[in-house]
Amino acid sequence: MAGGVSALSIAGQLVLLASLPLLTRLYTPAEFGLFTIYLAAVNILGAAAALRFETSLYVVENRAQARVGLKLILFSLLATGSLVLAAGLVTVDRLPAETHNLVFLVPLGLATAGLVEAINCWALRFGRLRDFALGRLMLPSFMAALQVAFGLAQLGGDTMVVAHILSQILFAGVLGFRVFSRADFRGVAEASWRDAARAARREYKFPLYDLPATVAGYAIINLPAVLIGSLFGTTLAGHFGVAARLVTGPTTLMATPLSNVFVAEAGKSADGAHLRRSGHGLLLVAAGAIAVPVLGLGLVAPYLVVPVLGEPWREAGHIVTALAVMAAFQVLSTPLQDVPTLMRRQEVRLGVDAVRALLVFGPLLLGFHAGWNALSVIDLMAAGGAAGFALRAGASLLLLNAMSSAEPLPNEMRPSPPDAARCHG
């Protein structure tokens, strides 16, 4: 089934890639830049929208507990969305005029993103892997279709953002009614707040350790676009966003099913030697099937971008080359990315991600203050990102070797098949 998840994930990304030559002719680099800044904010804040309680659905014992957990998740989404909206309203006068609409759109986007992730986690927990896989195709397809339709209607750059929000609402409606029963809806409404508070106390490690680590991880991937937009303008942010869509997004989703396979193996067997062999095998697959082709894409990108996307997007080709190196190391670190969580060593993940953040944002800010040109700064940032992903892969390998010589994982720490897959990508 992991193969099906991978195939539909790739198909969804191919839909996005196929739409790019049309979208780059319907929207300007500046409009793409605004969408890139919005998407970066939603990806970072959306990772914290439910305080990571959505991942606690993996360890619930039954649907009754899951319904209580979902009530806690919905409350968290409402609270964080309201806080982000209030913060935006307070700071709106200090923001560039072209970003004022984002004050209202970002809270809505992060709330719908958090809901989508919760539905994905629920689907995985209760064996709806087929529906989860279908969602990996539906969500990008909905967004691409809406963005093209709005672009053809010439409704303006903000509609790229509106299309993203609407696609998530459509996804939540379609997949939600497939994976939730009437009893689930009724159970969530009837769940007591006292039980929700007990669930929050029981799963405190998710907001305490997993939340900052996840936000740091998403910030490493998404915040550079925001900083590039603020330091060098939204046009360059648009080039960066298109380059990222071409290389880092697809490669991440292609590599994530390999992580799903490893988690599934951990759910079926606690034998450390078997897990080590599985992990090493998945690393070889990631290197040969994904990382090497990504590096090849980086080599040819400067020659292909203008014929495919148009002359205004020439700078995106150089950025693709820089990001391809970082993406290759990201691919190599992905198959074992859940090892710290499986071993309940979230503090290790937090420490590694803190160092990774320094390796990305340090060069970016230093290069800017040193007066380097924008493309050189991006090259330096990508090199730091590659080093950070290499560090993550090394830490996971060390923990995996420790796992192979340790006692089997307790049952409550192991995901139960067939739901052992990652709910977010």
Image (cartoon, rainbow, N blue to C red):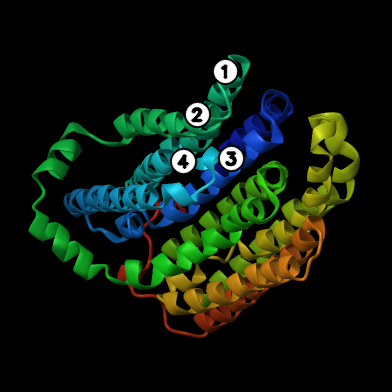
Q: CA distance from mark 1 to mark 3?
A: 18 Å
- Amino acid, disc 3: Leu
**Residue contact at pointers 4 and 3, CB within 8 angstroms:** yes
Q: Which mark is residue 149?
A: 1
Mark before the other along the chain sequence, 2 or 1: 1
Helix, strand, or loop for circle 4? helix
Label 2: how many residues lie within 10 Å, few (<14), some (14-19) or many (20+)?
A: many
Residue extending farthest top: 153
**Residue contact at pointers 2 and 1, CB within 8 angstroms:** yes
Mark before the other along the chain sequence, 4 or 1: 4
- Amino acid, disc 2: Ala
Mark before the other along the chain sequence, 1 or 3: 3
Residue extending farthest front: 93
Q: Is residue 229 rendered to the left or right of residue 269?
A: right
Above-or-below relation of 385 to 304: below
Instruction: Give percent across and percent down for residue 58.
Output: 34, 57
Q: Is residue 2 rendered to the left or right of residue 104?
A: right
Above-or-below relation of 305 to 365: above
Residue holding disc 4: 102
Q: CA distance from mark 4 to mark 3?
A: 9 Å
Q: Is residue 354 rendered to the left or right of residue 56?
A: right
Residue holding disc 2: 163
Instruction: Give percent across and percent down for residue 88.
Output: 39, 49
Label 3: how many residues lie within 10 Å, few (<14), some (14-19) or many (20+)?
A: many
Residue holding disc 3: 34
Which residue is rendered at x = 16% and y = 50% of the image?
64
Instruction: Give percent across and percent down for residue 125.
Output: 34, 50
